[in-house]
Amino acid sequence: MWITAAKGRRLWSHALGVLDQVLFSTGALAVGVLLARWLDQTSYGEFTLASALILFLGGLYNSLIIEPMSILGPARHDGVPQSYFVTLLLIHLALSGCLFGVVALGLTLAQSVGIVRIAGVSADILLLATTAVAPSMMLFWLVRRRAYAMFRVVRAVRSTLTYVVVLISGVAILSWAEALTLPRSLWIFVIASLIGCLVDTWSSLPAFASRRVLTKARDQVWTVLKQHWTYGSWAVLASVVYWGNGNLYYYLTGSLVGLSGVATLRVVAVCLQPVRTIQAGLVNVLLPTLAAARTAHDGTRVFRRQVAGSAVLFVALSATYATLLTVLSVWVLRLLYGGRYDDAAVYVPILAVGAVIDSLGEAAAVGLKALEEPRLICGAYAIGSIVTLIIGVPAIGALGTIGAAYAAVGSSAAFTVSVWLMYRARARREIATTPPAMLREGSAFGNVEM
């Protein structure tokens, strides 16, 4: 047999993971396009800044909760049992409550001294984005990634399909009723996220609420927090500098150029989002596989083959997509945005090159994540963020929005070179500490899993 039954199931899981991310990417692309068409440029620019803030909070949450679950769940908790998941839900509720208190207090103090906009976002939008949209979307991400960690990706597909349908139909109905505003569109994100969660967890709610599960979940809160913090503490800092790497330009552009420049960069980013999301789906499936491969028979050799294979796959996907988008940029922008952003075509080839470079760096980053070395990823992102600050401000000041696009490519290149150098050094140490017998004995199907 070329592929065993177990490997066939893994390949099927990979395919479902791609499908899940295609659905999610389609929803994100559709909503981004619809809001860009139906909101004015100022509102869409504010939506972009609010979205960047939500991604910042989501990055912190992913580092402390979701990504450790993908690694520690299969390795230390025999998958993601009900008690472990309920523990994560309790932690989620506690973090959401703390976030609400901090943001509400900060906005109250800001308004008391006459500050009505923070980082270009109005106070009411900031409160809604951080205390309602962010917690609900992060809960949805947690539910979906639990399905990945349990190798039941079909459940994630079902939840994502529901989320996309509710999200797109909700925005479309508001527009048809001539009632679409930025706050109402953000509430649609909340509703879609919560319904997506219920689709996956509805049948398990009675089990989650049982006394045995709740007692065990409550008793292990501090243990799980400690495990997640040990793994994710460096990843938290990495998420901060990663966010700065990809989103700081929005705030710099908004400050130096205006919200219309932010909107222009965002419409191009939306066009590039599908390939990034497909790649993220592959990462979600690959992480548990790589984590298990480290301790498997001939794990070191299989691990390095999988990382190398992911690099080839990521670059091939992104380069193909970027080339097609560049060639068809004028037609695509006019089709999607109805002629409102035709001038954004000049930014497409620049940011497309950055997307290809980022895809290469992501392959090394996923290898370091599986090696439980988030601190090295943090270092690579820090280098990229330093480049952002060094070349971003003068480039935007001198060239405007197109300067931000060129600086983004330079930042991506700095990150990719750094992360690959760190991964190669760490992989060599992994080989040096692997018993010789494991290196000599091979696996006929070691590279089939990619």
Image (spheres, rainbow, N blue to C red):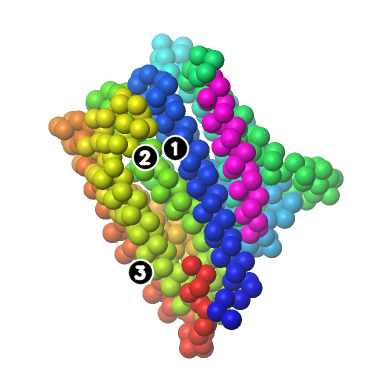
The residue at which mark 2 appears reads as: 271
Residue placed most toward the observer, 224 or 327: 327
Q: Residues within 10 Å of mark 3 (few under 14, many from 20)?
A: some
**Closer to viewer: mark 2 or mark 3:** 2
The residue at which mark 1 appears reads as: 29
User: Residue extending furthest right?
Assistant: 211
Position in image of residue 315 (x %, y %): 35, 59
Main SS, magenta residues = helix
Occupied quadrant, residue 50: top left
Kind of element beneath mark 2: helix
Residue type at mark 1: give it.
Answer: Leu
Q: Is residue 155 visible?
A: yes
Report the residue at 74% width, 51% height from top.
Answer: 83
Q: Is residue 105 above or below residue 390?
A: above
Residue placed most toward the observer, 205 or 101: 205
Q: Is residue 378 above or below residue 30?
A: below
Mark 1 vs mark 2, CA separation in Å: 7 Å
Kind of element beneath mark 1: helix
Residue placed most toward the observer, 153 or 94: 153
Mark 2 vs mark 3, CA separation in Å: 32 Å
140 magenta-colored:
no
Marked residue nearer the N-terminal end (1 or 3): 1
Q: Residues within 10 Å of mark 2 (few under 14, many from 20)?
A: many
Q: Is residue 219 above or below residue 448?
A: above
Quadrant holding the N terminus: bottom right
Q: Disc 1, disc 2: CB below 8 Å?
A: yes
The residue at which mark 3 appears reads as: 424
Position in image of residue 368 (x %, y %): 44, 62
Stretch of the chain drawn in magenta: 150-174
Residue type at mark 3: give it.
Answer: Arg
